[in-house]
Amino acid sequence: METNTTSLPMKILVAVLFLFLLGPVILVVPISFSGEQILSFPPASWSFRWYTALFNNTPMISAFWTSLLLGAIVTAISLAAAIPAAYVIVRMRTAGSGFLYNFFTAPLLLPTIVLGLAILIVFASMGFLGTFTGLVIGHLVITLPYALRVLATTLGNLPLACEEAASTLGGRPFTVFRRVTLPMMAPGIVAATALCFLVSFDEVVITLFLTGPRLSTLPVQLFHHVESRADPLVASVSVLLIFLTLAVVIIVDRTVGLSKTFVK
Amino acid sequence: MTASTTIDAAPAMPRFALGRAGTATALLLPIALINAIGFLLPVLNLLRMSFNEALAGGGIRETFILDNWTGLFGDSFYLELIMNSVSVSLGITFLTLVVSYPIALYLHRSSGRWRTFLTVLVISPLLTSAVVRTYGWIALLADQGPIVKTIAALGITPPRLMFNTTGVVIGLTEILMPYMILSLLAGFGRLDPRVEEAAMTLGAPPSKTFWRVILPLTLPGIALGCLLCFVLAVSSFITPKLLGGGRVFLLATEIYDQAIVTLNWPLAATLSILVLVIFGAALAVYARVLRVIE
Amino acid sequence: MMHQKILSGTPTASTDRDVHLRLDGLTKRYGDSVAVAALDLAVPKGELVALLGPSGCGKTTTLRMIAGLITPSDGRIIVGGSDITASPTYKRDMGLVFQSYALFPHMTVAKNVAFGLEMRSVPKHEIEKRVKEALAMVRLEALSERKPRELSGGQQQRVALARALVIRPSILLLDEPLSNLDAKLRDEMRNEIRDIQQSLGITAVFVTHDQVEALSMCDKVVVMKGGQLEQIGTPVDVYETPATPFVASFVGRTNRLEGMANGDGTVIVGTGGLRVPGRPGGKVEILMRPHRLKLVDANAAPEGSAERFNRLAGTLTRITFVGDLLQYHVDVAGSEVIVEAASDHGRGFWRAGAPVAITWRVEDTMVFGRGA
């Protein structure tokens, strides 16, 4: 449905560039079915051996469960802390709510390598390194700003009149919030949930500084694996991860629409 | 970030048992607490750390010295590291712009479901771990990989594409593409297809239309995308670490090595602050460029 | 700030006993600017009062202060004898219909209407009964399970009305409820709202910038401008005997001439002389409604005595056909006066450039002093 201003060479160029953009991700699918001992493309033989290897790789499996649990907890805390904060900043509009918003979303401006180091140094003295608590707080530092940003935007776009109507009808502030504000924020909450979970589940750099020998997340485990060995195991994990991400994305798309969530 | 829906009246907020200020404080407490422990304290501490003295074997002496900073600029290794990081990042930014611009322009001109589909394609890599995408590049760029083999089959001596700067540049360019495309699209809002049509009806051939009309109108989007990609490139860690194979020295990888391997936290902190200074400089250049464009 | 007193033109001026809603020096300031300046108002039980004025006149602010959505800077709000100035919105028992309707998008029509009753812990079976009644009143029983987005603008408006009325509020507040409807629907809803209000005998305050709505629906009209009260009166009062030039020009259309009054009931305009009601003196402005003017031949004999009719000579400059009316633009001593007459198949008797005279009754002349 493109306009006729696009010429054929331009179309070919765009197709090649899309291939460049998506190639590395698409590539892991065939690699995961490789029958070879080492990473190679195209593989000389095909098999499911790396999926079998994955399910027998205890550190990888336990890292997956850690990541899943971590993502769930981080998401829950992010929502619990960001919803009231968004309400205060957007709806109560105290003096300096603009400053508060900028302050609470500031961690997104810092590169994760710097944040990771900063958190490492402080957490070392607090005894948080290599602990689950440390990972939760470390992830919250970056998921909270995302949650706040999505939720504050959602709330800011909601008409105030509905909440006012509810209060003229006799709803007390908390009742109005629970029965009107919160349900109307639902699309934003779904988006924030998906975003927080994906950000936490994918986080590598900060986590690298905070994990210990006995506690690791899946992305960190993958990182160390790629760093030390070149075999197709990571491809099989990646394929499963892509499907997990796809599932989350489809759920979000069905609920609120993808472009509304990520293209802001 | 404005929420006002009425013209001549700001809403009166309901009264709370704790009072307005009390309620607001209570509701902000959780986020403030997490922010204080996980962000404010660590960042302030990082600043302080860059003035401490590193002792042999990972020890730290609380003091206030400028040695880390003077050492940085007196050591040719670090000077080269900084110059290298900045120039490689600039190169990556330029390449990313070149490969992203056609996609963004095409996306801007498409519409309906096709556009939605392409947008999803552009966003989807963002939802895939950088480790996974870098891993894909390792498979592609390896010495026995398909690209090297193809070049060799053409009878040319293939260059090494991995564990050197070339690999890092290729990998990061692809990793940063979605950010560039989305920034460009945001800036393309001003580009009305009728303006192009107007230029062509006035007799401008496609190439002239591009250089004289399209490009100038999209400069703000280009500036935004370049700023974003530059800061992300300067601070990127995963891809340089994995595709560089320890042979490419950039700021982010050095910070990690100093923090985890050498255990020289004061030096790592100093390098981190330096990254932030480069961020600030990039932002200043961006503001300047934007003023010239407008 | 001076308090403006109520100028009730009705013969049965409301006594204190009948007053249901009273505003007492109600004021809202934002920093240095005054949105509403010391407004006094008394609304008898069962009356529909319009707050009329251009945007920014403070009418919506006043309504929102009554509802408790804005905290007044000064003054009191008294309903049924008790001061509610400090009580929160949810305790005020007001039914507010919003300009945007503000229906809860996630609830069905029935759930929207039931909300206020649920807040009042009304037993379930009674909620059902009253929701049904309220929806029957606005003729929407069939749509009770629909979501608001599946309704037309007019239907949403009716749901909003039912939701506000089902709680049997002590006062019904309407904030520009018709401004989002198209013209035909607006006429219908105007009558419907008025009928329901009268049959329930509920006290109501209606905010609008539309003079037709205010004049046609309401018992009393409060004209406001820049936060100040301009006039309170019956629709006939504000139309026929406007208190200020602003009221005259906002409530209906006017022609404006400037003149010098002699203090004996005559005014000099240009080279002509006019008779006006009363005995003003000094610089004055004269306002006349276009449809109360008559265009006559410059040489025609006067229609009645000069005591009862005014007459000014001028030149016809332009004739505009606007469908059911013809507008004659007449140059009178350098000022343009518009005369409106029913159009007869678009044909007028006059031609542009003709010397003409305009005449009208002395009592149709509105005169206001212009100060020194």
Image (tube, coloured by chain):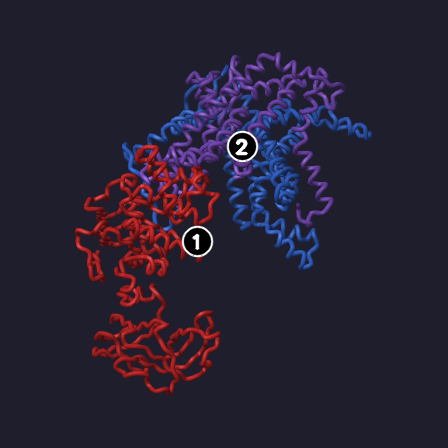
Using the rendered image of the protein, determine whether residue C103 is visible from the camera's viewpoint: yes
Q: Where, quadrant-wise, is the C terminus of chain C in this rendering? A: bottom left
Say which residue label 1 marks: C181
Using the rendered image of the protein, determine whether residue C31 is visible from the camera's viewpoint: no
Q: Position of residue A20 (x, y in %)?
A: 68, 34
Frontmost of labels 2 and 1 is: 1
Q: Are there few (<14), some (14-19), or many (20+) residues within 10 Å of tag 2?
A: many
Determine whether B254 is above or below A187 in the image: above
Alpha carbon separation for disc pair 2 and 1: 35 Å
Q: Secondary structure at mark 1?
A: loop
User: On what subunit does the disc labeled 2 rest?
Assistant: A
Say which residue label 2 marks: A252
Q: Position of residue B32 (x, y in %)?
A: 38, 29
Evaluate if marks 2 and 1 touch, with contact meaning CB atoms under 8 Å apart.
no
Q: Where, quadrant-wise, is the N terminus of chain C in this rendering? A: bottom left
Judged from this view, the residue extending furthest toward the right is B155
Q: Amino acid at mark 2?
A: Val
User: On what subunit does the disc labeled 1 rest?
Assistant: C
Q: Secondary structure at mark 2?
A: helix
- Residue at 56 percent across and 19 percent down: it is A218
| C63 displayed left or right of A17 | left
Q: Amino acid at mark 1?
A: Leu
Q: Position of residue B120 (x, y in %)?
A: 60, 36
Chain C: drawing colour: red
Determine whether C110 is above or below B129 in the image: below
Chain A: drawing colour: purple
C297 or A136, which lies in front? C297
Find residue C55 and name its label. none
C47 or A28, which lies in front? C47
C37 or C351, which lies in front? C351
Chain that the image shows in blue: B
